């Protein structure tokens, strides 16, 4: 019991550190949010040809914007650890590698959620989506999709943190592994925008939930090997 309590306390400390830095600088949320909004605006100009087709395009716009913005957020989060030997300082602390992974994943999940909070209303406005009607369903899909995004990003962000072309390598491995979550999120959001009730979204939510659990468990198990290798 004490080990579990210590694990959660250490993870909360790591996440709190990242959030405190972000509150002081605002660079991750600002850059990622701006990029996501820019993607949504460009897509609205390119694909908005009517209310019916627009609501079919909007789900893809939301999740593509979130996916690309997540790469920026993940890359910058790990770049902070690389600067001035911060990562080495973390590794010499009496801190479990699993707790380090969990704390980083939690902070990245929060950053991604904030980006989603920014980009979803913008996309809804640009594509004339009734956010009051679809809001609960979007919240459910977001809660299911974001942990998987954060877990994959944390795991492979750690793997690429020491490489020179880390952003390119991260994107190369991040998007293929994220495909199940993104496809389920887009499909579920499309069904939601088409008028499907919440109970018809549970298959998509289950796919995203399973993906998140698998990569969170895998990350906790593999993180020590990756970060110490």
Image (cartoon, rainbow, N blue to C red):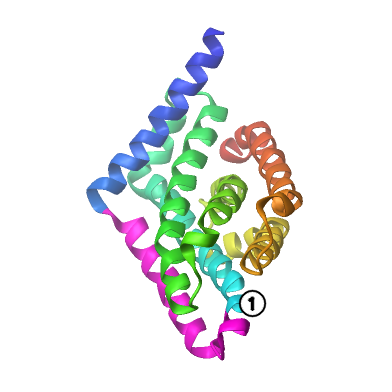
Compare residues 121 and 130 and report the one nearer the observer: 130
Q: Residue at x 44, y 21 (%)?
A: 9
Compare residues 141 and 105 and report the one nearer the observer: 141
The quadrant of the rendering that contains the N terminus is top right
**Residue 170, position as x, y percentages in the image:** 58, 59
**Magenta highlight: main SS:** helix
Which span is picked out in magenta? 26-54
Query: 19 above or below 63?
Result: above
User: Few, some or many C-alpha atoms within 10 Å of disc 1 (few <14, some 14-19, many ≥20)?
Assistant: many
Q: Quadrant of residue 90?
A: top left
Query: 33 above or below 25?
Result: below
**Residue 155, position as x, y percentages in the image:** 60, 45
Q: Residue at x 76, y 50 (%)?
A: 203
**Residue 161, position as x, y percentages in the image:** 51, 51
What residue does disc 1 label? 56
The image shows a total of numbered marks equal to: 1
On the rendered structure, is 130 left or right of 114? right
């Amino acid at each position: 019991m004490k080990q579990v309590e210590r694990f959660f306390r250490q993870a909360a400390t790591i996440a709190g550190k990242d959030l405190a830095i972000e509150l002081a600088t605002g660079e991750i949320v600002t850059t990622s949010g701006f990029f996501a909004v820019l993607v949504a605006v460009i897509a609205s100009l390119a694909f908005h040809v009517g209310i019916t087709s627009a609501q079919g395009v909007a789900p893809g716009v939301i999740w593509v914007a979130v996916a690309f913005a997540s790469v920026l957020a993940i890359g910058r989060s790990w770049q902070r650890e690389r600067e001035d030997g911060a990562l080495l300082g973390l590794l010499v602390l009496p801190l479990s590698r699993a707790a380090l992974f969990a704390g980083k994943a939690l902070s990245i999940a929060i950053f991604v959620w904030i980006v989603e909070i920014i980009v979803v209303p913008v996309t809804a406005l640009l594509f004339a989506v009734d956010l009051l009607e679809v809001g609960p369903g979007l919240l459910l899909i977001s809660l299911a999709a974001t942990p998987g995004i954060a877990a994959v990003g944390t795991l492979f962000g750690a793997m690429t943190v020491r490489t020179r072309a880390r952003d390119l390598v991260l994107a190369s491995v991040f998007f293929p592994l994220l495909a199940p979550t993104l496809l389920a999120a887009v499909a579920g959001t499309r069904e939601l925008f088409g008028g499907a009730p919440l109970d018809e979204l549970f298959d998509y939510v289950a796919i995203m939930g399973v993906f998140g659990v698998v990569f969170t468990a895998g990350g906790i198990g593999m993180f020590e090997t990756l970060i110490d290798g």
